[in-house]
Amino acid sequence: MLPTPALRPWIADVTLIRPDSALPLVHLPDAATALVYRRTGAREGDLRVVGPRSRASCHPGKELPMCVRVRLHPGAARPVFGVPVSELRDRAVPLSDLWGDRATRLAHRLNELTGPGPALRGIEDALLEGAHHGSAARGPRATDARDLLLREAVESLSTTGERVAVLARRLSVSERRLRHLFTDRVGLSPKHFARIQRVRTVLAGAGSAGLAGLASDTGYYDQSHMTADFRALIGVSPGAFRAGRLPDTTPCAV
């Protein structure tokens, strides 16, 4: 599912999730914040904001008629939801806690729709409307110096493995300022953001390369360094994850 062009600067991807009670629900570490609509009955559903996840979790499966997840680019959630993203880290918060009556009206509209396509359009309309409220009034394409700084830092930490201290010097900011910007707008420290992005790169390549070569390709010192970082964030080793072994399941809070 593709977002409307006007929102692509904000939206990283849109996914229709089909939960199955027979399969565990695995949430991988993720630096993105997401808006999730879950249809729980014929005309019942809820909207939740899922903040960045600092490590993986695994929960018992559940059946849902529909679940649409809209992931925002790192840095986009602060103007959309109007709170420091650090307040959302490792939490699933009812959208009504952040948007009030606007969220309630949106949920009622979505509950009357019949499929994921119309539901996505309804969510997008609400996000566009949000561009005219509060701190999002600048609109999705507007930028300031902090936007540009964060965008470059996110790109570098996601793709180059540049050290945070080196990155801060290159961008002519202090490490403290960079850390504050990430905590406020991404919800994670720059170092933890980089760890998550690297582990997700390992996950993307885990089925197609040897572990030693994968460690080298993703910027780890060696395979043991990669394994330790992977286990800390995922809960099992890369080899175990590749073999289909998952972290222990825990009850889902939502």
Image (cartoon, rainbow, N blue to C red):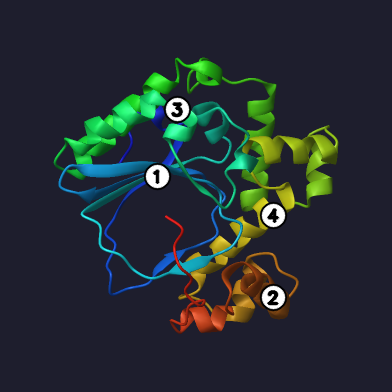
Q: Which class describes the residues within 10 Å of circle 4: few (<14), some (14-19), or many (20+)? A: some
Q: In the shown orientation, is residue 44 left or right of residue 126? A: left
Mark number displayed over residue 99? 3
Contact (Cβ within 8 Å) of mark 3 with mark 1: no
Q: Nearer the viewer, mark 3 or mark 1?
A: 3
Amino acid carrying mark 4 in the image: His
Mark 2 secondary-structure assignment: helix
Mark 1 secondary-structure assignment: strand
Distance in Å between CA atoms under marks 3 and 2: 40 Å
Q: Residue at x 15, y 47 (%)?
A: 42
Distance in Å between CA atoms under marks 1 and 2: 29 Å
Which residue in the structure is indicated by mark 4? 192
Please tell me which of labels 1 and 2 falls first in the chain. Answer: 1
Distance in Å between CA atoms under marks 4 and 1: 22 Å
Amino acid carrying mark 1 in the image: Asp
Position above or below: 226 against 2? below
The quadrant in which the N terminus is found is top left
Which residue in the structure is indicated by mark 1? 13
Comparing 131 with 108, the one in front is: 108
Q: Nearer the viewer, mark 3 or mark 4?
A: 3
Picture quarter containing residue 4?
top left
Position above or below: 188 against 246? above
Please tell me which of labels 3 and 1 falls first in the chain. Answer: 1
Q: Residue at x 52, y 76 (%)?
A: 247
Q: Which class describes the residues within 10 Å of circle 1: few (<14), some (14-19), or many (20+)? A: some
Distance in Å between CA atoms under marks 3 and 1: 22 Å
Distance in Å between CA atoms under marks 2 and 4: 14 Å
Q: In the shown orientation, is residue 221 left or right of residue 227? A: right
Which residue in the structure is indicated by mark 2? 228
